[in-house]
């Protein structure tokens, strides 16, 4: 096993929060904007899809490859307290 985390944390580490924020600056009808934001928020909801687990496994990696941190499994610096 390489790593395990909740889907919400995984997606936030991959930049979903920035993507949600960026939607506010796109030119699209407000109804479409609100729908897209709602869909993305559903992926993060800990009582919904955000509570699912993400399991990352590997096979046949070299020691160098295995030592590489995966973006979705590490907490970005701006999210660390």
Image (cartoon, helix red, strand yellow):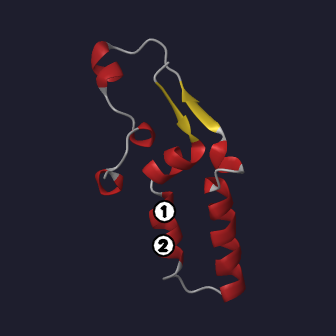
When the figure is inspected, residue 33 is found, relative to residue 1, above or below; the finding is below
Q: Residue at x 36, y 55 (%)?
A: 79
In-image side of 43 versus 27 (left or right): right
Q: Within 10 angstroms of label 2, few (less than 14), some, or many (20 or more) residues? A: few
Across and down, in percent, residue 42 comes to 68, 59
Across and down, in percent, residue 9 comes to 50, 47
> How many numbered discs sit on the rendered protein?
2
Across and down, in percent, residue 38 comes to 68, 69
> SS for tag 2?
helix
When the figure is inspected, residue 46 is found, relative to residue 57, above or below; the finding is below
Foreground residue among 73 and 51: 51
Q: Is residue 14 visible?
A: no
Q: Residue at x 45, y 42 (%)?
A: 72
**Residue at which label 2 appears:** 21
Task: Give the spatial CA distance, label 2 vs label 1.
Answer: 6 Å
Q: Within 10 angstroms of label 1, few (less than 14), some, or many (20 or more) residues? A: some
Q: Residue at x 64, y 79 (%)?
A: 33
Across and down, in percent, residue 41 comes to 63, 63
When the figure is inspected, residue 60 is found, relative to residue 40, above or below; the finding is above
In-image side of 68 versus 34 (left or right): left
**Residue at which label 1 appears:** 17
Q: Is residue 9 visible?
A: yes
Q: Residue at x 44, y 65 (%)?
A: 18
When the figure is inspected, residue 74 is found, relative to residue 14, above or below; the finding is above
Q: Does the residue at mark 2 contact the one at mark 1 (Cβ under 8 Å)?
A: yes
In-image side of 27 versus 46 (left or right): left
Image-quadrant location for residue 74 = top left
> SS for tag 1?
helix
């Amino acid at each position: 096993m390489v790593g395990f985390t909740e889907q919400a944390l995984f997606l936030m580490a991959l930049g979903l929060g920035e993507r949600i924020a960026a939607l506010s600056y796109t030119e699209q009808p407000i109804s479409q904007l609100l729908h897209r934001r709602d869909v993305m928020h559903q992926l993060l909801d800990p009582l919904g899809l955000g509570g699912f687990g993400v399991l990352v496994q590997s096979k046949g990696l070299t020691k160098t490859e295995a030592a590489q941190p995966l973006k979705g499994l590490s907490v970005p610096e701006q999210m660390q307290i």
